[in-house]
Image (cartoon, helix red, strand yellow):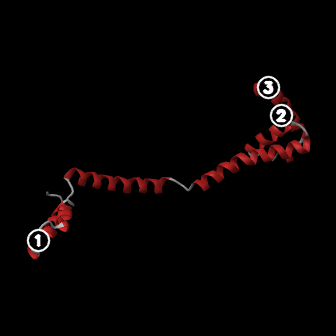
Amino acid sequence: MGTRPNRVLDTAINRVKKKSKKIGHDDIMAAMSEGGVGPDDYMRFRLTHRFDRLAQSLHEATNKPQYESGGAILKMLSDPIDKYEETIEKTGSAEEAKLAVLADQMGVDYKKMPDSEKQSLLSMFARSKFARLFKKRK
């Protein structure tokens, strides 16, 4: 046999044979004799066990729990939507709401911007190719 588990099994079988009397067909001895592990099976088990430990350690080292990353994504998506809805309620202008979201993403407080700057940015936004695309879709 040769592999480590088989050596332990062989030792156990030899001890049982030495200490017991042979009486006909011994089911226990037959089960013990069939309990050997072939070299290929033994190596496959060892490699699989090592791979499982490696995969588990990589998973623990690289993955955050789903709820943490999912919460950050939801916040990242919901903040601009909240800003857009809040601004459109106050102003009634979709363009101004888009501008408020853009200003917020750039770190500019849209509420504190002078009206002249808002108007300049709105006229610039109206000339952009993106604004024209949105108008075509309506």
Residue 113, visible in the rendered structure: no
Find disc 3 in the rendering and name its residue.
137
Could you say which quadrant of the image residue 113 lies in?
top right
Going by the image, does 4 lie left or right of 116? left
Horizontal and vertical percent position of residue 16: 13, 72
Q: Which sits in the foreground, 60 or 97?
A: 60
Task: Identify whether 16 is placed above or below 59.
Answer: below
Q: Amino acid at mark 1?
A: Ile
Q: Residue at x 37, y 54 (%)?
A: 52
Find disc 1 in the rendering and name its residue.
23
Q: Residue at x 9, y 74 (%)?
A: 21
Horizontal and vertical percent position of residue 14: 11, 69
What SS does tag 3 mark? helix
Could you say which quadrant of the image residue 85 lies in?
top right
Could you say which quadrant of the image residue 37 lies in?
bottom left
Q: Residue at x 76, y 40 (%)?
A: 102
Going by the image, does 25 lie left or right of 69? left
2 or 1: tag closer to the N-terminus: 1
Other-residue count near label 2 (Cα within 10 Å), few / some / many at <14 / 14–19 / ≥20? some
Residues at discs 2 and 1 in contact (Cβ within 8 Å): no
Label 3, label 1: how many angstroms apart (C-alpha)? 92 Å
Q: Which sits in the foreground, 36 or 105?
A: 36
Find disc 2 in the rendering and name its residue.
121
Horizontal and vertical percent position of residue 136: 80, 23
Which image quadrant: the C terminus?
Answer: top right
Between marks 2 and 3 in the image, the one whose residue lies nearer the viewer: 3
Q: Residue at x 80, y 46 (%)?
A: 83
